[in-house]
Amino acid sequence: MGDRSRFEEWEARLWERLAGLLPAAQDAESFRDSREIGEQEAGLWFLLERLADQAVPVDETTLAEIEVLAEHWGERLAVHYRVEACARDLDRAGSVRLVPDSEVQAAAADDLTVLPWIECARCPSVLSRAHTREPSGRPGLYATRYLVTRADTTETFAPTELLRAFESVLACH
């Protein structure tokens, strides 16, 4: 099964689980409908707005999954502040967490800027986004690859392998 169809299956299951977070049945249906009509970007905005407005507690792993969806749909930068604004479910420990903005230390490698993004809660595995450095020195808008770093090893994933990179961190070797 190709990475694209694996992602679509994962996304469908996740979308349904995320709809279940919304307290109002009408909101959950609107969220589901956004995916059905191919408006995933609008659906993510709607979901995050409702979660924040209603102070729905969300565990760290689910927030990371939302960011992975947003990254896939090219909306991560636009919705990141909304993800950060979500109430945290402190009663449910996540297996991964988003690296807090205050802890992100950009690293330079060749012509890339590497930004830590999602880390395992059980081991030192970190999923980072690698961006081509613009002439201004800033990272480009979209990741050109994903890196999973563990102890002394780094695994590289193509942009189309985002789900595999995320699953690698979830697997906690």
Image (cartoon, rainbow, N blue to C red):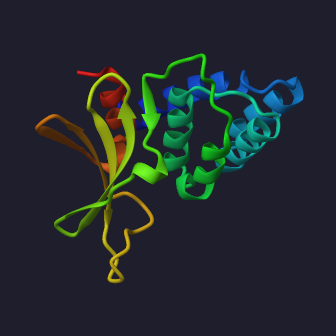
Residue drawn at point x = 50 percent, y = 36 percent:
64
- Count the marks: 0
Would you say 117 lies left or right of 152 here?
Answer: right
Would you say 72 lies left or right of 80 here?
Answer: left
Q: Quadrant of residue 33?
A: top right
Question: Picture coordinates of residue 108 (x, y %)?
Answer: 23, 64
Front-lying residue, 26 or 48: 48
Front-lying residue, 69 or 54: 54
Would you say 24 lies left or right of 2 here?
Answer: right
Q: Where's the N terminus, which quadrant?
A: top left
Question: Picture coordinates of residue 83 (x, y %)?
Answer: 62, 44
- Extreme residue in the top direction: 91
Q: Where's the C terminus, which quadrant?
A: top left
Q: Quadrant of residue 28?
A: top right
Front-lying residue, 115 or 160: 115
Question: Picture coordinates of residue 67 (x, y %)?
Answer: 53, 42
- Extreme residue in the bottom direction: 135
Would you say 77 lies left or right of 120 here?
Answer: right
Residue drawn at point x = 73 percent, y = 39 percent:
47
Question: Picture coordinates of residue 6 (x, y %)?
Answer: 42, 29
Image position of 15 with respect to 112: above or below: above
Residue drawn at point x = 76 percent, y = 44 percent:
49
